[in-house]
Every structure is written in C-alpha cells, then in structure tokens.
Image (spheres, grey):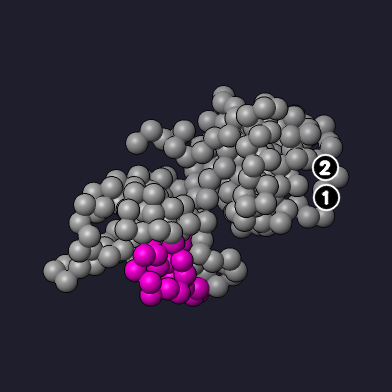
Amino acid sequence: MKIALIGYGKMGKMIEQIALSRGHEIVSIIDIDNQQDFESEAFKSADVAIEFTAPQAAYGNYLKAWAAGVKIVSGSTGWMKEHGDEVRRMCSEEGKTLFWASNFSIGVAIFSAVNKYLAKIMNQFPQYDVEMEETHHVHKLDHPSGTAITLAEQIVENIDRKEAWKEDTTDKKYLRVDHIRRGEVPGIHTVRYDSEADIITITHDAHSRQGFALGAVLAAEYTKEHQGLLTISDMFKF
C-alpha cells in the first residue's frame, strides 16, 4: 500500500517505521515547510494519508488531501466542534473518506469497550460514584485528552445519574474528569467507581507511542478498502 504522511513529528516517524516494517511504501511526507506537496503527483499516488498534526491544521489538511483524491486516517483532535458537521456531510454526501479516532491503540480500543460495558452495569448501582483521571507528558497542552473525552462521553451516555462531564467540579450530577501533566508519560487513563464498601478501578497505561502508531497503520490498511466516516468501532467489532 502507498502511504502519505501528514505531520512528521515523533508520531509520524514511528508510523513510518511500522508502515515500512509491514511492507508498505511511504510515497510522500508533508510537514509545515512543504505544504505545496499536497499538489504533487507523489502525494496524489497515495492510497491513504495518515495525519497527526495540530488541531488548528487538521481540517485544512483534510480538505487538501481530499482535493488530491486521497483518503485520510487522522488522530488530530480539537476540530470537531467547529468543522464536525461539515466533515460528516462531505463523507456522507460527497464520497470523501476519513478514519478518525482520538486514540488508535488496540489496547485503548479494548479498554473503551470494557468502559462502555462497565458503565451499563454500574447504572444499576447508584451507591457508586464515578470519576476519571488522565495523565500525559508535559508537552501535551490540551486537556482533557481526546481519549478521556471519548471515555467520558461513553460513561455519561450509559449512566443516568450523570448529566455531562466536567473538569474541576464537586457537583455529583457531573462526571468529574481530572488531568495531570508530568514527565514523558505517553498516556494513562483511569476510571474509578467508588462506594463506602469498595472501589472498582480500570486503567489503561501506555508503555510507549508504539501502540498508537501500529493502530494508525492498521486503520490505514482498513481504510484502503472502505469509505465514508470511519472509526475504531468499524475496524474492531467488540
């Protein structure tokens, strides 16, 4: 498969290594200093572009890739509030393809399925209050993480006693989501159900970014054969 990379930071370089190890070809690498390459024949030859950039750049990158006739896999967050409806429309009405996930880790996909199922169970037990905590490296400026938001939305959707999620709240009608930034932590997400009798805790603790990079390449392999607005739940049927 021919893959283009949009964004060539730590994630981009790791994705390149894994893609090559799986027998794929990197035909184009686009970073901030060669934006004109979106119009190159090399980029247009890609089956899929994998995009990991800044939130403010993601939507524009989607438009440029689609203009070149290239499908996209993206892990960029922060664009959905402003551009989500337009992206959904373009995928459903104009034949564009975007595989988007807040986290591509296979372990996180499994953790997410467990989180959703556990929330459905805990909806029956109001004596347990639920809260979430996410920890990431000090270079991560946004909070809570996109993964934490996805997990929080799953909980709120399935637990009737929580109206929404919020940071820094003591109001029990909200799911409290805390964030910690320290060192070079790739990502830790913890959900706790606490009662007077006991506590139930589930945690996903990433050892490195390798799991995210592998998941992104697996998503590219899936996207090559599918179209529309895709996500992890399409690729993994739990």
User: Looking at the picture, does residue 62 appear above or below residue 156?
Assistant: above
Disc on res. 43 = none
Q: Amino acid at mark 2?
A: Asp
Q: Residue at x 84, y 37 (%)?
A: 39
Q: Secondary structure at mark 2?
A: helix
Residue type, mark 1 in image: Asn
Is the C terminus in the top left, top right, bottom left or bottom right quadrant?
top left
Q: Which residue does the numbered mark 2 point to in the structure image?
A: 37
Residue 77: give x, y in percent of width and height: 60, 54
- Given contact means CB atoms under 8 Å apart, are the residues at marks 1 and 2 in contact? yes
Q: Is residue 182 magenta?
A: yes
Q: Residue furthest left?
A: 197
Instruction: Quickly name the residue at label 1.
Output: 34
Q: Which residues are magenta?
A: 165-189
Which image quadrant for residue 193?
bottom left
Across and down, in percent, residue 196 comes to 16, 71
Residue 181 versus residue 69 in the image, above or below: below
Residue 41 location in percent, x, y? 82, 32
